[in-house]
Amino acid sequence: YDVLDEQLEAPLFPTPISQEIAHFVVENLDESGYYEGDTEEFCQKHHIDYEVFEKVRLRFAYIEPTGIGAKNISESF
């Protein structure tokens, strides 16, 4: 988690909401590194669109380790 936290800054996560989404994704990773959080609940709580959340979550494709934050094995590739 420390390695991930170090990567959750600009330029990939430049805004406060993008950093909050990124931290939420990290907090909701299973033991294999897949995202298992309740996106709908997060979006309602923070008054953002699902598409905004997904746009930020997909930025995990650019951080290490590869595949972290994906929803399933096919997305991790």
Image: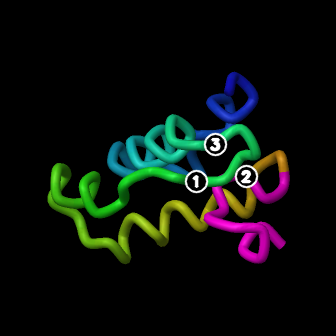
Q: Which residue is mark 1?
A: 35
Residue 70 falls inside the magenta stretch = yes
Q: What residue sits right under mark 2 in the picture?
A: 68
Q: Quadrant of residue 59?
A: bottom right
Q: State which quarter of the image contains the N terminus.
A: top right
Q: Which residues are magenta?
A: 66-77
Q: Say whether residue 47 is left or right of residue 76.
A: left
**How much space separates mark 1 and mark 3, taking CA atoms?**
7 Å
The disc placed on residue 26 is: none
Residue in the image at 63% along x and 42% along y: 30
Provide the secondary structure element on which disc 3 rests: loop
- Packing grade of label 3 (10 A; few <14, some 14-19, many >=20) is few
Farthest residue in the top direction?
A: 2
Give the vertical position of 6 relative to 16 (above or below).
Answer: above
The mark found on residue 30 in the picture is 3
Name the amino acid, label 2: Ile
